[in-house]
Image (cartoon, grey):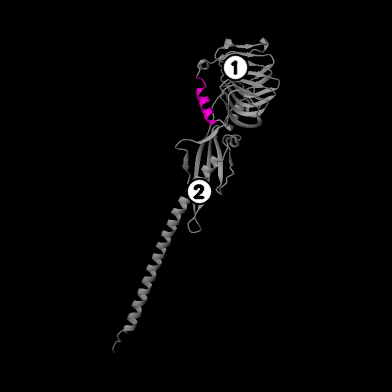
Amino acid sequence: MTRRRPSRRGVALIATLAAITLLGVLALASARVARARLVGARRVLGVHAAALAATRTLDSALAHSRAADWAPLPIGAERAVPSARTEPLVLRRLQSRLFRLDVAAQRGDAIAPTRHAASLLVRADAPRLDRGAPLVAGASVVIASDFRIDARPAGAACDGDVATPLVLAADSAAVRWEDPAAAEPVRELPALRAPEAFDREVARLRTAAELTLADAAHYAPTSDSARAVFADGDLTLGPGTGAGVLVAMGRLTIVGPLRFRGSILAMGGVTTGGPGIELAGTLVSMGTARLSGGVLRYDPCDAESAAVSAARLHPLGRWSRATLW
């Protein structure tokens, strides 16, 4: 019995099928590699786009935010922040003057979706005028019988905080109460005797002031919204309602009726003339002072809140930005 030799056509067909199969496998592998490269390239572009969007959102939020809008947020709390961009923003208050903005940006497409989350540490740059007492005197002070200084704050948020003493002075003998029955202990603070005691605060507010006034100006606040005010010379304050941080390089004259919440620094001294003067916060007079016709209520919360509200917002140094994921 003789064997039949394989047909040349059959061998060629098998070889052709093997070649087609091999080419198909190579084509599929090449397509997978190409798709992987495409997805990788899109993911890289998406990461860069998401990071750029997050950075722009943080910068835009900082540029268009006011410290007065952030000040009511309690320490440790967080809330959403309105933004002109589509990325969601969250504001967290870490300390009294330290905040953090968080943003999550999403870019890419269904093939290569990417997300980028970043944060920005922001500080409220405002001078600290509060020295732990309602009245801080660097020179002689006369307190009339119709002027009252309260140690307990009016705001419920600060209940329990009591200022001790009512007056900090460079020289306790220079503080005189016209009504001896109303006299309170005065604590001496030798640092107030230095002419440069508040130079740093003055310099910071000079550059950060929202409103700068010329010598002999008259400022009658019309809103309880806090602001930073700097007067280059003498200033008359009131009547009206205001809040924030106010510095007068000359003599300050306060006229009523006036309600002011925050911190006041009068480098040339201060004179009050009521009736109806209500000050909540702290009053610093580096020149001679005569106080009459009103009340000065020490409220550290009001003083700090007003200072933060009137502050400028700045990134916290070179390490202020961080990538979360």
Q: Amino acid at mark 1?
A: Val
Q: Tell me the crowding category of disc 2: few under 14, some 14 to 19, or many 20 or more residues within 10 angstroms, Cα based.
A: many
Corner quadrant of residue 252: top right
Residue 8, position as x, y percentages in the image: 31, 83
Residue that appears at 59% across and 41% down:
79
**Which residue is at the front of the view, 273 or 42?**
273
Q: Which mark is residue 167?
A: 1
In the current view of this chain or complex, which residue is farthest to the left? 2
Instruction: Look at the picture and state if 233 lies above or below 1.
Output: above
Corner quadrant of residue 224: top right
**Which residue is at the front of the view, 298 or 18?**
298
Residue that appears at 51% across and 26% down:
203
The magenta stretch spans residue 125: no
Q: Which residues are magenta?
A: 196-208
Tag in front: 2 or 1: 2
Instruction: Look at the picture and state if 80 lies above or below 162.
Output: below
